[in-house]
Amino acid sequence: MFARLLEKFESNRKWGDCMTFKELLKTVVFNDVWTELKKEYCMKDEAFEAYFKVFNQLKRLTPKPNHESFRLVVAKVEDGMVPGTFTYDVFGIKPDVINHYALELLPWSEWLSFEVVEKCIEVYSAAAVVAHSLFEFTFFGFDAADVEANTKKEIKILKERHEKIENGSAELVSWDEVCKHIGYADDRTEEEKELQHKQFERINAENNKVYEMLLS
């Protein structure tokens, strides 16, 4: 489904005709961004200063070239793990590639050059797109240099684990062993499992409609 959405998106839009995230920052005031953060993430007042500093630091940073033609997407979708609740999915897309790309491990300067899908701004507002993006890329910290250092450590760890899996030296643990270790027991009835499966299918279908609306 998502592959078809991207094909439709690419056929209707030309890459290179949208506002970059850096340009979007210049169109909003932080108080509006903070209002969105506080509403959606139940932020305490003490967090205002931290996000305000991030906002201003981003405005001073020089964007790195967007060589892979990433576009930034912000979509409000239903949480498949907690039906009836909604979350903001923030991810990147590239031309001719069907994948969603998580962006937490990228330097902030790279985010700044991403073009923002215009429909996201139209539907949610510029302040909302900025707010949910800020929440996403502060996962590893609230300073560009600290985030870049932290993400490099994470990438190194992931590469080391991948290498261990590839060369057969990793100690693999079965899902049953993990459940036993954490004390989790799946005591759902077959009827409950079927109901949850149907609910997941319903959520997936509804979320695909959101993606289609934003990318078409």
Image (tube, rainbow, N blue to C red):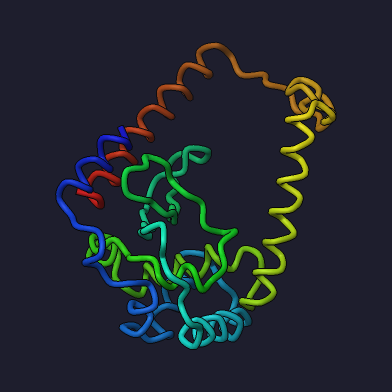
Residue 28 horizontal side relative to residue 5, left or right: right
The relative height of residue 193 versus residue 141 in the rendered view (above or below) is above
Q: Residue at x 67, y 61 (%)?
A: 151
Q: Please, is residue 197 above or below residue 31 in the view?
A: above
Relative to the observer, which residue lies in front, 82 or 173?
A: 173
Would you say 22 lies left or right of 18 here?
Answer: right
Q: Is residue 159 left or right of residue 38?
A: right
Which residue is painted at 40% across and 71% down in the image?
113
213 left or right of 143?
left
Residue 213, how many percent across, how many down? 22, 48
29 versus 207 height, above or below: below
- How many numbered circles are shown? 0
Residue 206 picture location, percent across and down: 31, 38
Where residue 182 sits in the image (x, y, percent)? Answer: 81, 32
Give the residue at x 53% y 71%. 108
Q: Quadrant of the N terminus?
A: top left
Q: Nearer the viewer, residue 61 or 176?
A: 61
> Based on the displayed image, in which of its 4 quarters is residue 8 positioned?
top left
Q: Quadrant of residue 78?
A: top left
Q: Residue at x 25, y 65 (%)?
A: 16
Q: Nearer the viewer, residue 87 or 16?
A: 16
Is 198 above or below relative to 23? above
Residue 148 at x, y = what percent?
Answer: 65, 69
In the orientation shown, which residue stands out farthest toward the left? 12
